[in-house]
Amino acid sequence: MASVYKRAETNGKGTWYIRYQDPSGKDIRKATKAKTKREAQVLLQKLLQEIEDNTYELKQRQREVTFFEICEDFLTYGQAHKRSWTRDQDSIAHMKDFFGDCLAKDIKPVTVENYILHRKKAVTPKGNHPAPATINRELACLRTIYNRAIRNSKLENNPMKHIKLLKENNKRDRIVSKEELAELLKESPEHLKPIIIAAHETGMRAGEIFSLTWEQVDLKNRLIKLNPEQTKTNEGRKIPISSLLERTLSQHKRKTGPVFDYKGKSIQSVKRSFHKACKKAGIQNFRFHDFRHTFVTNMRKAGKQDRVIMAITGHKTMSMLTRYDTVDEEDLLNAVA
């Protein structure tokens, strides 16, 4: 019953067809994109082998999976398991606009390369182009989407397999001085001041600070205990409480609930109030995450061991720790003093 044949068309060309019986015995006649009889025969042989290996239904299903489908699978999983879910939503929105609801298998490495070129030329609401780091986060998201689909037997190949990420030049060396910190605290609203002190004195990430509860704060032993699910590395760690932070926390200590709140509600972001305070204090080119750079730099200047700093900040490698350690003019002058 299995055969290949060519059906003539009005344009003078023709289409190669394959004919075979599926596992249920149903007679299947299917048009192909084969340009020669040999290509059609290879395709037919592949289908017959799948029937013999009992993988035909699975392969057929994989050929029908759409890009939107694996994106929704990923987002459904990520909503409950990923801290970067909101960012992933933005990345997927850009990819959906470009790829459309095509078959997932039709996205090839060259398609991804075209997407990279497209994103490089895109214009953001602020009037500039997406940074290489932004595009890389989108590509990393795409890789994970396909890897998850492969693990779930929905696909066989990942188009990101041979794609190289863009070179990033986003290393920052901005730290805040004692004078700038004092001015920033002076211009900050009351709910922001303890958050700034916590960031400066611990080097904790913003998400770790905002998710902190009083049950995790041990003022007696001067330790903060972060749970694995709160950290970027999914590993719990203990953070010492400085004298300044101890005094700050002691002023509004409660038994339960979030450590940092605003009008009784937990704080999720201080981006707007922080930017406003920096502007009023005359502090330029400083981001909240730069407190982490400041902490690492100050600890190094104080002579603390690298392993101790890494235990506090949660950095896993020396290269990452070094990335957060800024050598400033004071260091240079001390070197020749």
Image (spheres, grey):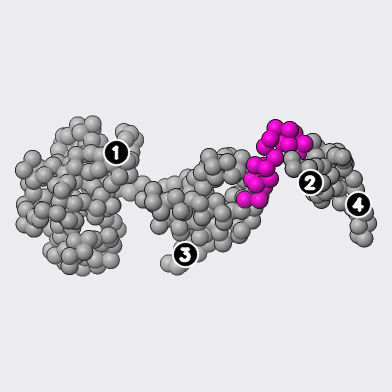
The nearer-to-camera label among 3 and 1 is 1
Q: Secondary structure at mark 3?
A: loop
Measured as percent of width and height from the top left, residue 222 is found at: 9, 42
Density class for disc 3 (Cα within 10 Å; few <14, some 14-19, many ≥20) is: few
Q: CA distance from mark 2 to mark 3?
A: 53 Å
Q: Mark number for residue 5?
A: none
Q: Amino acid at mark 3?
A: Thr
Density class for disc 2 (Cα within 10 Å; few <14, some 14-19, many ≥20) is: few
Give the mark nearest the N terminus, 2 or 4. Answer: 4
Camera-nearest residue between 189 and 306: 189
Camera-nearest residue between 313 and 169: 313
Q: Mark number for residue 124?
A: 3
Q: Amino acid at mark 2?
A: Lys
Residue at 43 percent across and 51 percent down: it is 78
Q: Secondary structure at mark 4?
A: strand
Can you identify the residue that label 4 sits on?
7
Residue at 23 percent across and 39 percent down: it is 237
Give the mark nearest the N terminus, 4 or 1. Answer: 4
Density class for disc 1 (Cα within 10 Å; few <14, some 14-19, many ≥20) is: few
